[in-house]
Amino acid sequence: MPFLLLATGLVVMSVLLAALAGVTLWWMLHAWRTPGDLKGTEFDRAPDDPGLSFSLIVPARHEQAVLAATLNKLRAMAHPDFEILVVVGHDDPETEQVARDVAAVSKDRVRVLVDDSVPKNKPKALNLALQHCTGAIVGVFDAEDDVDPRLLRVVDTAFRRHSAHVVQGGVQLIDFRSSWYSMRNCLEYFFWFRSRLHLHARHGFIPLGGNTVFVRTDLLRAVGGWDADCLAEDCELGVRLSALGAKVAVAYDPHLVTREETPHRIRDLVKQRTRWNQGFLQVLHKGLWRDLPTRRQRMLARFTLSQPFLQAFAGVAIPVSVATALFVRVPVALALLTFLPAIPTAAMAAFEVVGLREFCRVYYIRARWTDYLILVVGTPFYQVLLGVAAVRAVVREARGQRGWEKTSHSGAHLSPVLSAITRPAPDTVPGTTVRESSR
């Protein structure tokens, strides 16, 4: 009987892990299924004349090293009607001084707001700024963002051509050789913003990204802004707006993405993923996804929001499964079944190799053979890190630990070399069309 239970458990575990890996792989490749799908991921080629006004919010906490560069990039936006609202903490004089220095030379564009809330987090800062926004559209950027000056023009056009309530632009980590895991980190963003978010938009359920997201101000105020207690306030807002039937346009143009850096320490990466995973669990528990009108949307939402649980399960189950197959005396057929998840996992690794080639192509980088080697060899170790973060998120949520673990930034993505290889000539506006939500 114990052997039968062990055998049954191993088979069920292997089938579930294989199914999880297969579904993830299918979603990851959404944009590349047909040439039309890939073409539909980008912005319109020729933007219209500007017709909307924008309020750009930049929450900044202990970001004195990178904030000035971001604000100066935003000030250079090629759009006639926008304001920048920088939110700093009352206990962060270094960052506040940087913000005020920029505001002093751009009084018509930049305003500094001081957040007195305790404890502090990003959604509280966003809600404070929302009270002071005067533009028709609210946009959110992080303090370390490197933004293309043409972005607002194409976002403006996307809102009006597609009658959108929300426009989600692309975000891309760019310093892919800064550590052994940064390459995979960059590819995650590449597949998520270039492909998977378009799948979510097509099906009318989209967990929005944390920056380069634009929402009509009146709609944002009508729904009460961001959830101040959620660790994934971007995802939570996307779920609420999806349930209300908001039309979301998603676009990823390699030339117009907002560039960011990978976490420069493993500890920072694990904390970042813990926060994201825990936020997804909070949104799942909150249950607003149940208001989505179709069963298919609700299933997609439940699966997406449950991924921290699934990833935690995989992080624990895969090593146990492999160890059982290697060290426990079981029939050969059963041992082979325990390796079933390796099939889609190996396929995913193969597609990631192709994805790295595509990433290097669109960002004008010459791939090295060592890049591919590091990507493949680092796969199991990176999966362990994600598993640790997922387990940690589940434990923290179960214990009610919801403190905001902030990711530090050093500006690695702002190096002259990276800036030179990823931006085309400033007088061109590449792109095609915007993928709209089916709703």
Image (tube, rainbow, N blue to C red):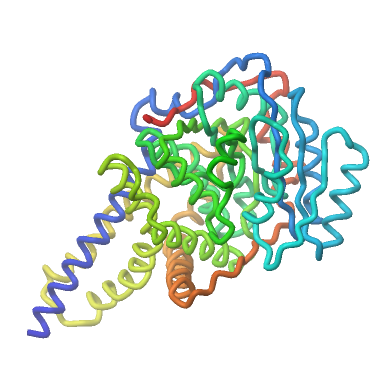
In the image, farthest residue toward the front:
222
Q: Is residue 76 above or below residue 11?
A: above
Q: Is residue 355 above or below residue 161?
A: below
Q: Nearer the viewer, residue 338 or 279?
A: 279
In the image, farthest residue toward the left:
1
Q: Residue at coordinates 45% horizontally, 31% vertically from top-left?
A: 247
In the image, farthest residue toward the bottom:
2
x, y (%) of residue 170? 56, 37
Q: Is residue 278 left or right of residue 91?
A: left
Q: Nearer the viewer, residue 263 or 109?
A: 109
Q: Residue at coordinates 89% horizontally, 54% vertically from top-left?
A: 97
x, y (%) of residue 370? 54, 52
Where the N terminus falls, by quadrant?
bottom left
x, y (%) of residue 416? 77, 42
Q: Quadrant of residue 8?
A: bottom left
Q: Is residue 196 visible?
A: no
Q: Is residue 287 left or right of residue 183?
A: left
x, y (%) of residue 78? 75, 24
Q: Residue at coordinates 43% horizontally, 38% vertically from top-left?
A: 195
Q: Is residue 360 visible?
A: yes
